[in-house]
Image (cartoon, grey):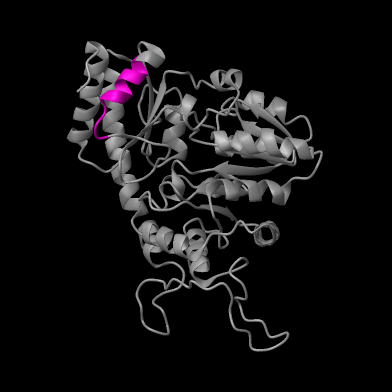
Amino acid sequence: MTQYSTLAIHAGPGPDEATGALLTPIHQSTTFKQDGIGQDREFTYSRTGNPTVSALEERLGALENALPATAYATGMAATTTLFLSVLRAGDRVVVSDVVYGGTVRVLQQVLHSFGVEAEFVDTADLNQLADALRKPTRLLFLETPANPTLKLTDIEGAAKLAKAAGALVAVDNTFLTSALQQPLDLGADLVVYSTTKYIEGHNSTVGGALLTRDEELNERIRFVKGTAGTTQAPWESWLTLRGLKTLPLRLEKHSQNALHVAEYLEKHAQVAQVYYPYLPSFPQYELAQRQQSSGGGIVSFELNGGLEAGKQFLSGLKLFTLAENLGAVESLVTHPATMTHASVPVEQRRAAGIRDGLIRLSVGLEGEEDLIADLDWALKCVLGGVLS
């Protein structure tokens, strides 16, 4: 069986047959010449298909032993296309209580007006999930690890419950990617990605992807994608293809750095709580060991002193950049309550553990000692109330 790192570099089309170019060409064309009426070639119009986009879709599919993926303009375009493909008025969706804020927005503020009901449930508790699935459910939407608390859901256990209830299972696998977690192997029907994050990995573009092994479902999704026009453009696909080649190597280093950062923070007196699945103190450590091959690059934590301490800490950072993204080579820091999850109703946000003092780190590929030195200085700013 071909190794993952080899597929990340070579899966899909090889060198360009026309020129021998090693990298997939950027087919920056709206339309394609046809041979005659009723003699359509594979590609006709880039909204429905483009050679560069298809190359990315083939490689992403190969990495999960799935059909070729469908690639999208953004991660939310992928999520929205999934919902439009499988949901109808009157359908019900059960969703992890901790998910990306954009997922909450599209369900509560867009699809609700079309008659789609969303119930947010603590899917980490399979008993609660089983209760929720007693009502007719079309789709179970999981995010694990969850953004930003990193709470986990047992994908295999949840999928068995959903299948017994007649529901499809989709997993947002953005935080780990297929390099560290394979939801389809654990029983999921669909996998969702913001390729903006680790898959592209360089803060240079946005994108999304959906994957499945079900041909009928894949065809339906591809039809909706082309109809709604949510497809990714060639240039963004080329950038994502380039980033994908180093995904397994980058995630290995991201995970190493993140574990060291988490261990450092856990020992610091100013830190009240650290959330990282590969810390033995993490409540779901055993589950993380079972369904993930590493901890990933995200660490979340809370400071003693709450929001005010968090503001002081953020002001003291120099190497970590305050920004709304994650998964790139540069280390980033985010305050979820006022950034990624600001639009989530306050009560819902706090019930999910997203408190005002929570800080999320996307640990990059810089030197481990430099990252810890930056955190150490910022924590001293909290303790001393001084800024440089």
Quadrant position of the C terminus in the picture:
top left
- Observer-nearest residue: 163 or 246? 246
Furthest-bottom residue in this view? 36
Examine the rendered structure and indicate whether residue 227 appears above or below residue 349. Answer: below
Asked whether residue 275 is in view, the answer is no
Quarter occupied by residue 113: top right
Asked whether residue 24 is in view, the answer is yes
- Observer-nearest residue: 209 or 381? 381
Examine the rendered structure and indicate whether residue 220 appears above or below residue 375. Answer: below
- The answer to whether residue 240 is left or right of residue 162 is left
Quadrant position of the N terminus in the picture:
bottom left
Examine the rendered structure and indicate whether residue 221 appears above or below residue 161. Answer: below
- The answer to whether residue 304 is left or right of residue 207 is left
Query: Which range of residues does the magenta coloring cover?
Result: 309-319
Q: Position of residue 325 (x, y in %)?
A: 42, 40
Q: Position of residue 7 (x, y in %)?
A: 41, 62
* Residue sitting at x 72%, y 48%: 86
- The answer to whether residue 340 is left or right of residue 299 is right
Quarter occupied by residue 283: top left
- The overriding secondary structure of the stretch rendered in magenta is helix
Q: Position of residue 75 (x, y in %)?
A: 53, 47
- The answer to whether residue 215 is left or right of residue 356 is right
In magenta segment, residue 293: no
* Residue sitting at x 35%, y 27%: 279
